[in-house]
Amino acid sequence: MAPRTLLVANWKMNLGIAESVSLARAIAEGCSGLAQTEIWLAPSFTALAAVKESLSSTPVKVGAQNAHWADSGAFTGEVSVPMLKECGATFAIVGHSERRHILGESDLLVVKRAAAVAASGMQCIFCVGEKLEERERGLTSMVLQRQLIALLDGIDRKLLPNIILAYEPVWAIGTGKAAEVEDIASAHAELASIWMSTGHQQSAPRILYGGSVSPENFHTFVHLPSVGGALVGGASLVAEKFTELAKISEQQQ
Ligand code: PEP
């Protein structure tokens, strides 16, 4: 059985190869011997192979921050799933809010990425979440439905075991202001209910929370049954903070 809590580090466009390897080693050392917590790291594309190599004797997995749907071809600047697998990636993050809202990726485009990742046997961490203005207008539920139904409509249901959802309210990412525990619980319940109501799966998906997760706030929501772990940006760039999150996760069991 998979460990109860999954902690995923999203290093975004930070760190060179040597820095990534050094952080990966520090995290793997600080997180050794965990019983109930799994650690996955998403370095930049350029550091992926070296980070994977440096972790070969540890249970820590590595993955990518994005992936293209075609295996190869005229897609300048993109990276394909076979290329990622060759570097040792076992998962990819897709539909991160920075891809959706800064790089302009649409619901349909991110679903194409997700379908290719899942079809390859890799795990796909599919991010959804509302912007502040959408929350303030009472549209959170509508946005989550739109983003998740686009996925459920666009992917073969046999591939759903390879999907992990990440609820990442856009206003909480990188702001230092995590969502309140009630908001996390209600968004996760909403996502599980959409997933189940479309009859796609026997059981609810694993859902991570992401948005300014830190050692100061993690204990407030990690114990929720609907929280399968966290997708962590800023705090994952500091080995001590990320290791502390793993310790908090272990204490909650
Ligand atoms: C993220 O990158 O997905 C994220 C949640 O970032 P942060 O933890 O810095 O808010």
Image (tube, grey):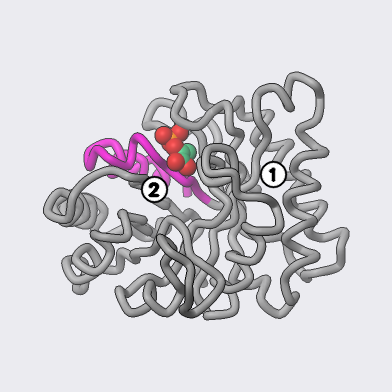
Mark count: 2
- Label 1 vs 2, first from the N-terminus: 2
Disc 2 secondary structure class: strand
Instruction: Note whether ligand 1 is within 8 Å of mark 2.
Output: yes
Q: What amino acid type should be assigned to the residue bearing mark 2?
A: Asn
Estimate the x, y position of residue 160 in percent, counting from the top left.
Answer: 68, 71
Which of the numbered marks, if any, corresponds to residue 28? none
Disc 1 secondary structure class: helix
Q: What amino acid type should be assigned to the residue bearing mark 1?
A: His
Disc 1 to disc 2: CB gap under 8 Å: no
Q: Residues within 10 Å of mark 2 (few under 14, many from 20)?
A: many
Q: Is residue 138 depicted above or below 109 in this figure?
A: above
Q: Is residue 169 magenta?
A: no
Q: Residue at x 40, y 26 (%)?
A: 216
Q: Is residue 117 depicted above or below 6 in this figure?
A: below
> Taking the image as drawn, is residue 29 in sight?
no
Instruction: State the extent of the magenta-drawn residues as a range.
Output: 229-253
Q: Main secondary structure of the magenta part?
A: helix
Tell me the quadrant of ligand 1. top left
Estimate the x, y position of residue 19 in percent, counting from the top left.
Answer: 15, 48
Q: Depth check: 2 or 101 in front?
A: 101
Q: Is residue 93 depicted above or below 89 in this figure?
A: above
Estimate the x, y position of residue 120 in percent, counting from the top left.
Answer: 53, 80
Q: Is residue 251 magenta?
A: yes
Estimate the x, y position of residue 2 in percent, counting from the top left.
Answer: 50, 68
Q: Which residue is mark 1?
A: 188
Q: Is residue 101 left or right of residue 122?
A: right
Q: Residue at x 36, y 56 (%)?
A: 42
Q: Which residue is mark 2?
A: 10
